[in-house]
């Protein structure tokens, strides 16, 4: 039988009813007793508990409503009506007692999922690590998925297109379909454009997928070189473990005379481009560490080589030379000297410029030059059917044999880039062998040490101790190294 309390009026309302009359203290005491009785009788019966919730609401027992709701959701966790009254949120098969707890859960889940995908947090968003350098520069992706500046995106949306790196306005685009090239303010035929770009400082600037080729060579030769360089880029990624955030720029000149103008320095071109020690491979490729624009004073350091189609075996040797130049540019991007460059751009390169530039490097010389030499002298070649893909490795090995074999470990690991081209070429070739063995020697301890270096570089961690371990492993497995090289 229902309690007679249910028949009690909750309010006394005189006519006309102006406002409810509060429940009297005596009635509240009786209701408290009734609540305790009903709560005990409900026990763990979800329906009885829910009926009690409704009764509490009808008798204005707000504090008791929450108490019963909490008991109800313990008995029946998925009681949606009760959860709704408590303000709980349902997400991912779970109930959350507040928006704050739900937000914290979502944030945790997003972080775990992002870390599984190898993403990193940047300004509150999860992005790929390789995207961070572009985002820091304020760049955005266009419809093709290519990173561009906001200014570039505006031009693209306005109908402009690029011919290499030259922007072409919508009303001039038809010139491109006519086979013309924009050179300065003029539109020239390919033949005339080749002559225009053959001049110093007016070289072609041709972007590839990963490489920016500046060259005075004719366009046909330039495209051959770019194709070779894109393949070389993949070898460098294997060595360092990560792609570069920017296109890797290098300069390929049409003959050795043009290259020497940079190597020796020229007033019209800027400060001397090298300390004389940057030459490698018998002067056929080097890193222009002292190249500063004479007007802006901006540093233009990059790998430099040449591709002379007129010289005997010019193209045969050029393939290896441009690969070495690319490797040197790549090394500087992965291991830059920002403080030395900033100081030199502000005050000009002083007498200690090269020392300051090199002392800021974090990676050992043998690894930077060895990675470049690997992609130049120890890579697996693309050959026609029936050819030997290891012919480059065998050629380099035969050169080392003819030159007296390997230097001592101390000389090899600690060598400086000297002005002696013959000695430098030999040491660089040996360093290339070390990297080739790391990549393809199938020596587990060496491979693992190299893997640790790649991971540290990817995470921006110090590599000093890891390189010391790699050196120990290489020395311990000298026999396998020599067998790999055929020495």
Image (spheres, rainbow, N blue to C red):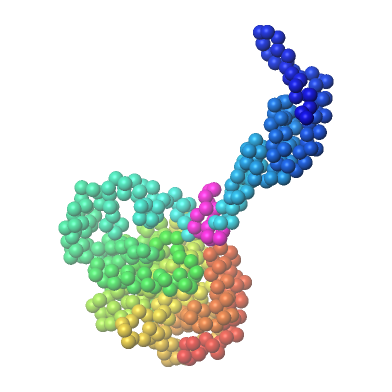
In the picture shown, does residue 218 fall above or below 421? Answer: above
Front-most of residues 314 and 460: 460
In the picture shown, does residue 331 fall above or below 408? Answer: above
Front-most of residues 339 and 103: 103
Count of labels in the image: 0
Is residue 349 among what the camera can see?
yes
Which residue sits at x=50%, y=65%? 335
Task: Please state the horizontal and vertical placement of residue 155, each as a whole percent of the image.
Answer: 31, 47
Task: Please state the horizontal and vertical placement of residue 408, each as a whole percent of the image.
Answer: 55, 86
> In the current view of this chain or complex, which residue is farthest to the front?
1
Is residue 279 among what the camera can see?
no
Tell me which corner region of the image, top left, top right, bottom left or bottom right, holds residue 261.
Answer: bottom left
Which residue sits at x=30%, y=66%? 215
Tell me which corner region of the image, top left, top right, bottom left or bottom right, holds residue 87.
Answer: top right
Front-most of residues 255 and 125: 125
Q: Which residues are magenta?
A: 115-129
Which residue sits at x=57%, y=76%? 448
């Amino acid at each position: 039988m229902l309690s007679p309390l249910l028949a009690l009026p909750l309010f006394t309302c005189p006519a006309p009813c102006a406002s409810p009359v509060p429940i009297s203290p005596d009635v509240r005491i009786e209701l408290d007793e009734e609540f305790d009785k009903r709560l005990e009788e409900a026990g763990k019966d979800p329906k009885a508990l829910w009926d009690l919730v409704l009764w509490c609401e009808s008798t204005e027992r707000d504090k008791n409503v929450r108490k019963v709701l909490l008991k109800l959701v313990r008995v029946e966790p998925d009681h949606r009506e009760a959860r709704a009254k408590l303000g709980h949120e349902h997400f991912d098969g779970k109930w959350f007692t507040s928006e704050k707890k739900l937000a914290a859960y979502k944030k945790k889940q997003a972080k775990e999922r992002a870390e599984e995908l190898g993403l990193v947090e940047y300004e509150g968003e999860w992005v790929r690590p390789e995207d961070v350098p572009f985002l820091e520069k304020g760049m955005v992706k266009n419809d093709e998925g290519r990173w561009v500046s906001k200014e570039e995106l505006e031009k693209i949306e306005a109908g402009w297109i690029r011919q290499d790196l030259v922007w072409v306005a919508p009303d001039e685009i038809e010139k491109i379909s006519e086979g013309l090239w924009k050179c300065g303010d003029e539109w020239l035929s390919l033949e005339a454009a080749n002559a225009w770009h053959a001049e110093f400082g007016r070289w072609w600037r041709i972007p590839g997928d990963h490489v920016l080729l500046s060259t005075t060579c004719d366009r046909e030769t330039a495209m051959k070189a770019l194709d070779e360089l894109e393949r070389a880029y993949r070898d460098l990624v294997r060595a360092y473990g990560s792609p570069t955030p920017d296109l890797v720029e290098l300069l390929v000149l049409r003959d050795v005379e043009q290259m020497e103008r940079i190597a020796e320095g020229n007033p019209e071109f800027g400060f001397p481009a090298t300390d004389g020690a940057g030459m490698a491979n018998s002067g056929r490729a080097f890193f222009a560490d002292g190249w500063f624009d004479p007007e802006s004073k901006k540093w233009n350091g990059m790998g430099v080589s040449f591709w002379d189609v007129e010289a005997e075996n010019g193209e045969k040797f050029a393939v290896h030379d441009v690969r070495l130049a690319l490797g040197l540019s790549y090394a500087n991007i992965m291991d830059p000297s920002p403080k030395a460059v900033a100081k030199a751009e502000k005050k000009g390169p002083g007498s200690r410029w090269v020392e300051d530039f090199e002392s800021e490097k974090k990676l050992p010389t043998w690894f930077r030059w060895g990675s470049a030499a690997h992609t130049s002298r120890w890579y697996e070649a693309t050959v026609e059917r029936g050819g030997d893909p290891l012919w480059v490795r065998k050629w380099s090995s035969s050169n080392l044999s003819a030159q007296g074999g390997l230097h001592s470990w101390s000389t090899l690991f600690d060598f400086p880039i000297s002005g002696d081209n013959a000695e430098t070429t030999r040491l660089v070739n040996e360093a290339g062998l070390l990297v080739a063995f790391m990549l393809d020697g199938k020596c587990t301890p060496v491979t693992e040490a190299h893997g640790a270096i790649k991971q540290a570089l990817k995470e921006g961690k110090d590599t000093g101790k890891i390189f010391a371990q790699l050196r120990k492993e290489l020395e311990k497995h000298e026999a396998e190294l020599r067998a790999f090289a055929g020495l």
